[in-house]
Image: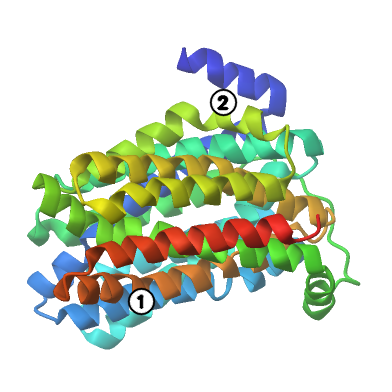
C-alpha cells in the first residue's frame, strides 16, 4: 500500500518532490528523538536549573523562528539546495555539540547554531518542494509533508527514549550525524534551480510583503492558531496526566488523526478559499473547547485533541499554499520565511502566558476560565477571518 502511494506521488509530482516529502520525515524524526530530552539532561546530568534549560530551548527557538525570513531570502539568492545543505550542517553541529558541551556559554552557543540551521533549511525545503510545480499541486504537496512530518514526530521520541540520560551525548551525536548526512545526500543530487534575480534585494522583497495587506492579514490570523497549538506541549500533558495518569497518548492521538485524515481534509478544502479553511479550523477549535468548560475528563480532553488535530489538517497546508501563491518563483523563500513570524509570535505568547494562565486559574479553582479563554480566542479569530475581505 505504501509503495503504491509512493509511486503515485513520484509519478504525479516527480522524484524531487517525493524525495523532499520523505526528507521531512527524517528531519522531524531526528529532531524529536533529541529535543524532548534536552531539559532532562541539562537539569539532571549537568545539574543546571530548569530556568536555564528553558532559556536554552528558548534560544534555539528564537534562533530558528527569528531568522527564518533571512534564511528564506538567502535561499532565493544563493539557491535552495545550497542553503539546505548549510542549514543541515549547522543543525547537525549544534545538536551534536549540545551533547558534549559542559559550560553554560557553550551550551547556549550550540543551541543558537542549531536554531540558525533550522532558519536556513526550513524555508528552503518548502520553497524547493513547490518550485516549478503547478499551483494546483501546492496544497497537496504541503499536505504530504504534513503527514510525513507528523510520522517523524511520533516515532522520533520512541527512539530517543531508548537512551538513558547518561547516554544523551551519544543520542545528540546520532541526531547531529543524521542532519549532516541528509544535507550531504541532498547536496549531491542533481537538483537544478534557475539563477536568482539579483535585482531583488532583501528590503525590496520585504517591501513586497508589507505592501500585500491580504497576506499580512492571513499571517496575523495564524497567530492564535500557534498560541493554541503550543498548549499541546505545555498544559495538555499536565491535564492529561491529571485525568488519565499519563500524557504520551495525547501526541499519539493527534498524530494518528493527522496522518489518517490529512488527504481527505485537503480534498475537501479545495471547495473553499484559504480564509474559509482557516474559519473552519477556528470554528472547530472553539466548539471542541466548550465541553472542557464543564469538566476536565478523558472524554472532553479527547474531543479537544481531535479539534486540534483537525485544525492542523485544515490550516497548515492551506496557509503555506496561500503564502506561496502570493510570491513569485524568485521570492518563495523570503515569503515563506516571513510567514513564520506567525509561529514565532503565537508560539512565544503561548509559551509565556499559556502555562501561567492555567496554573493561576487552577490555583483559584477557576479552571473552566482557561478553556473559556481558548474558546473565545478561537471564536474571535473565526469572526475576524469571516469579516475580512477576501
Q: Which residue is at the far front?
A: 294
Percent position of residue 235, x then y: 26, 62
Residue position for label 2: 264
- Image height of 35 relative to 56, above or below: above
Secondary element at tag 1: helix
| Image-based side of 216 in relation to 377, left or right | right
Residue position for label 1: 353
| Image-based side of 221 in relation to 106, left or right | right
- Image height of 289 relative to 116, above or below: above
Q: Which residue is at the far bottom?
A: 105
Q: Disc 1 to disc 2, how far (Cα)?
A: 34 Å
Residue ID at (69%, 51%): 127
| Image-based side of 255 in relation to 65, left or right | left
Query: Looking at this view, is 96 or 300 the one in front?
Result: 300
Residue 79 appears in the picture as rendered: no
| Image-based side of 155 in relation to 144, left or right | left
Percent position of residue 316, x then y: 57, 48
Q: Which residue is at the far right?
A: 199
- Residue 270's mark? none
Residue ID at (80%, 80%): 203
Amino acid at each position: 500500500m505504501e509503495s503504491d502511494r509512493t509511486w503515485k506521488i513520484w509519478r504525479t509530482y516527480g522524484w524531487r518532490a517525493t524525495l523532499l516529502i520523505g526528507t521531512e520525515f527524517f528531519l522531524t524524526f531526528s529532531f524529536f528523538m533529541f529535543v524532548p530530552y534536552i531539559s532532562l539532561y541539562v537539569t539532571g546530568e549537568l545539574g543546571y536549573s530548569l530556568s536555564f534549560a528553558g532559556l536554552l530551548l528558548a534560544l534555539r527557538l528564537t534562533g530558528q523562528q527569528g531568522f527564518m525570513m533571512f534564511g528564506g531570502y538567502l535561499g532565493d539568492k544563493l539557491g535552495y539546495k545550497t542553503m539546505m545543505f548549510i542549514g543541515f550542517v549547522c543543525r547537525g553541529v549544534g545538536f551534536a555539540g549540545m551533547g558534549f558541551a559542559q559550560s553554560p556559554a557553550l551550551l547556549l552557543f550550540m543551541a543558537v547554531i542549531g536554531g540558525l540551521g533550522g532558519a536556513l533549511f526550513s524555508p528552503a525545503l518548502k520553497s524547493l518542494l513547490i518550485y516549478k510545480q503547478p499551483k494546483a499541486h501546492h496544497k497537496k504537496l504541503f499536505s504530504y509533508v504534513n503527514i510525513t512530518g507528523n510520522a517523524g514526530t511520533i516515532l522520533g521520541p520512541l527512539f530517543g527514549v531508548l537512551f538513558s540520560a547518561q547516554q544523551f551525548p551519544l543520542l545528540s551525536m546520532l541526531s547531529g550525524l543524521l542532519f549532516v548526512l541528509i544535507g550531504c545526500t541532498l547536496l549531491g543530487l542533481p537538483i537544478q534551480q534557475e539563477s536568482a534575480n539579483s535585482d531583488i534585494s532583501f528590503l525590496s522583497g520585504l517591501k513586497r510583503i508589507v505592501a500585500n495587506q491580504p497576506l499580512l492579514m492571513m499571517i496575523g490570523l495564524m497567530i492564535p492558531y500557534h498560541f493554541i497549538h503550543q498548549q499541546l506541549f505545555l498544559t495538555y500533558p499536565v491535564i492529561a496526566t491529571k485525568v488519565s495518569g499519563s500524557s504520551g497518548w495525547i501526541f499519539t492521538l493527534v498524530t494518528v488523526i493527522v496522518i489518517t485524515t490529512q488527504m481527505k481534509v485537503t480534498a475537501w478544502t479545495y471547495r473553499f478559499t484559504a480564509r474559509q479553511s482557516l474559519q473552519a479550523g477556528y470554528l472547530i477549535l472553539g466548539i471542541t473547547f466548550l465541553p472542557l468548560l464543564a469538566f476536565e475528563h478523558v472524554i472532553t480532553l479527547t474531543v479537544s485533541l481531535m479539534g486540534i488535530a483537525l485544525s492542523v489538517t485544515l490550516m497548515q497546508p492551506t496557509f503555506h499554499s496561500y503564502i506561496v501563491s502570493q510570491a513569485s518563483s524568485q521570492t518563495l523563500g523570503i515569503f515563506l520565511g516571513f510567514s513564520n513570524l506567525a509561529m514565532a509570535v503565537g508560539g512565544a505568547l503561548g509559551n509565556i502566558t499559556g502555562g501561567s494562565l492555567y496554573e493561576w486559574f487552577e490555583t483559584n479553582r477557576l479552571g473552566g476560565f482557561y478553556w473559556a479563554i481558548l474558546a473565545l480566542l478561537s471564536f474571535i479569530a473565526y469572526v475576524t477571518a469571516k469579516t475580512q475581505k477576501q
